[in-house]
Every structure is written in C-alpha cells, then in structure tokens.
Amino acid sequence: MRVEIFRKGGPITIGREREVRKFILGKKIGMTQVFDDNGTAIPVTVIEAGPCAVVQKKTAENDGYCSVKVGFGDIAEKKLNKPERGLFTKIKVAAKKHLKEFRVDNADKFEVGQIIKVGDMFLAGDRVDVSGISKGKGFQGTIKRYGQKGGRETHGSMYHRRVGSMSANTNPARVFKGKKLPGHMGMDKVTVQNLDVVRVDGERNLMLVKGSVPGPKGALLAIKDTVKQGG
C-alpha cells in the first residue's frame, strides 16, 4: 500500500512496499528431509515454484511505480469471466488461476508474455521470505487461540476454559479494545522470513526451503528475496 501526503515542497510517500529483485509464485507440496554433505538431516518444505507468466508490467513513467504482475497455475478459460479471458487472449498467454503483483526495481528486465522459471530466479544458498494463508482452525477459545492458562481442573470449580476477568468494575466499567476473546482462528496472511533455499530443481520446477511455511498442502505461496539481507 502506498499513501501520498501533499505538503509544502511536494508530496511525500509513506507505507511504500519493498521492491524486490527475485520473486515467484508457487504451491506447497509438503515437508520432507534431505541430508547435507556431513550427513545432517535438514527439514525442508517442497514447493512447486512456477513456471509463471508475466501478464502485466507497470513503470514509474506510466503508473508512478515499477511492478510486475505474474500468473501461476493453468485454468480452463470457461472458468474465467469475459475481461479475464480478454486479458490472456490479448497477451497470448494460457489462462492462469492465480495473479499477483510484485514491486520490483528491475521491471525493464521483464516483458509481457515472458515465462519465469524457478531456476532462472533462485539458487541454492539464497534466502527468501515466503508468504501464504495459514491453516484455518475455525472458532476457538482463548486457551487454544492465545495459549492462556485456564481455570482449575478440580471438582466444583466450574471455571475451566473460560476467558477470565473481562475488566474493572466501576472504573472504567467497559472492556478495553484488543481484549483477547474467543473467535475465528487462522486463515490469516503469514510471512516466514529469512528461510534458506536448500535446493533448486529447475527441470521439475521444485524448490526446497529449510523449515516450514504457512498453509496446508496445495496452498498458494509468494516467494521473494528476503528483507533481512544481512541476517
């Protein structure tokens, strides 16, 4: 998100998204383990990364910022609406199920219709940030949702898994905003930062990253170079 505030001397921009050089969309396959040269087991997540097609390119001259919109995952054209079908017909690219825009600092290196593969973007040893939608847990109480302790389990306490004290009595006589209460858990956008790329298989469009990533098997993932370059 980018917000411009106008003041004397010209506009200033706040909340600007980070520009990246490496990016790709992928699908979570699952977790396994691989072994390094010393025989140490490394837990990894297998991601089917790409191929992605460039469907739109924005430039600072025309749009005020540079970005590349890519599509991932083939889909039947009959499942798209008329504007979406017209977009893919115009650029002569097979219809894609998922579209995402990445802010980039090297948009001039991409062309509409270009196919991006994981082997062209990432190498083993890179560090990436992986974003996805976490697993949904449904409606949960505060013990599962926030890890609260709960009441006594003894006979007759009648207070086992409830919320606890809601607020002071006479003053302020209300419940403060942000009080941890039961509610929907999961299904949030989560980003795991600074993951090591263990292996890249360009022929099979696979990427192995160390550790876990958000979402269930088959979840859509956005992968880009990490913000913690020195971490």
Image (tube, rainbow, N blue to C red):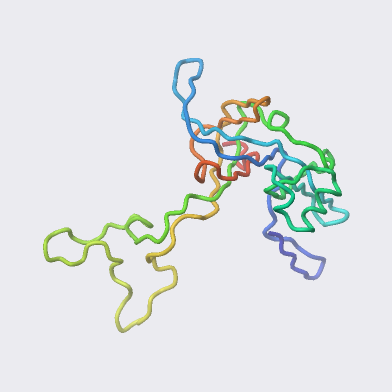
Q: Position of residue 11 (x, y in %)?
A: 79, 65
228 in relation to 204, above or below: below
* Residue at 67%, 48% in the rendered image: 98
* Residue at 13%, 59% in the rendered image: 154
Residue at far front of view: 78
Residue 181 horizontal side relative to residue 80, left or right:
left
Image quarter where the N terminus lies is: bottom right
Quadrant in which residue 224 is drawn = top right
Residue at far right of view: 61
86 in relation to 127, above or below: below
Q: Position of residue 106 (x, y in %)?
A: 79, 41
Q: Position of residue 57 (x, y in %)?
A: 82, 48
54 in relation to 1, above or below: above
Residue at far bottom of view: 170
Image quarter where the C terminus lies is: top right
Q: Position of residue 189 (x, y in %)?
A: 55, 53
